[in-house]
Image (spheres, rainbow, N blue to C red):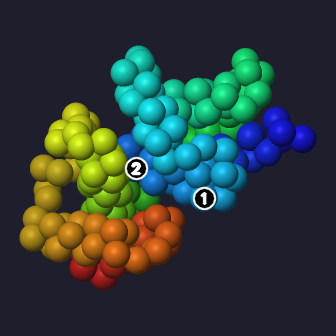
Amino acid sequence: MLLLQIFLSFFKIGIISFGGGYAMIPLIEREIIEVQGWLTSTEFLDIIAVAEMTPGPIAINSATYIGYTKANVLGSAVATFGVVLPSFMAMVILAYLINKTKHLPHVKGALRGIVSGVIALIGFATFRMAVGTGLATVDLDLPSVLVSFNIYNIVICIGAFFLLHYTKFHPVLLLISFGILGIIVF
């Protein structure tokens, strides 16, 4: 039962995440600390620090380590598989769809809006980690889409950051909302 719970928790994290490891940190934090109660905030920050120091994507490293803390090696494998499976399935489907529709203005706008939301999630995760640990910097690998970043993107990022910081706005709803806003603005 525990292994199924670990798989489903990380599958849920994997399926509702967009934007990579740093953008997943608030989702992992919410699921593992608030929903499941598996870790304290301090334990979570320690795991993020270990996951950051080890080679590989932070989300996979975090899932592997958290799975291990709950159910040893089998828990690691189940958590890792759970967090990776949705991305693998989504990439196969999205690669096909985006290749067929990338020239459409609404698709371009939605992607630009989503990028703004993802950047806000990364900024929010950085802020939460800096406040929680007293660290001032985190090395970020931002997407190449920033080449076309403009004042609208900056306003969207700031708005998303404040929504995440001052409200209980769910990160998935933020990405959907800002995807729609991207269609309208761009």
Q: Secondary structure at mark 1?
A: helix
What residue do we see at 72% from left, 32% from top? 70
Q: Residues within 10 Å of mark 1 (few under 14, many from 20)?
A: few
- Relative placement, left or right, of 38 versus 145 is right
Residue 49 visible in this rendered orientation of the protein: yes
Q: Which residue is mark 2?
A: 23
- Which quadrant of the figure has residue 108? bottom left
First reached walking from the N terminus: tag 2 or tag 1:
2
What residue do we see at 46% from left, 54% from top? 26
Whether the residues at callouts 2 and 1 have beta carbons within 8 Å, the answer is: no
Q: Secondary structure at mark 2?
A: helix
Q: Residues within 10 Å of mark 2 (few under 14, many from 20)?
A: many
Q: Is residue 47 above or below residue 37?
A: above
**Where's residue 116, x and y in %?**
28, 62
Residue 127 circle label: none
Residue 34 circle label: 1
Residue 115 visible in this rendered orientation of the protein: no
Task: Kindly report which numbered mark, 2 or 1, lies closer to the viewer in this rendering.
Answer: 1
Find the distance from the CA under tag 2 to the CA under tag 1: 17 Å
- Which quadrant of the figure has residue 121? bottom left
Which corner quadrant holds the N terminus? Answer: top right
From the viewer's side, name the closer residue of 154 and 50. Answer: 50
**Where's residue 19, x and y in %?**
40, 49
Q: Is residue 82 above or below residue 131?
A: above
From the viewer's side, name the closer residue of 159 and 44. Answer: 44
Which amino acid, by three-letter code, is at mark 2? Answer: Ala
What residue do we see at 55% from left, 57% from top? 30
**Where's residue 90, x and y in %?**
58, 47
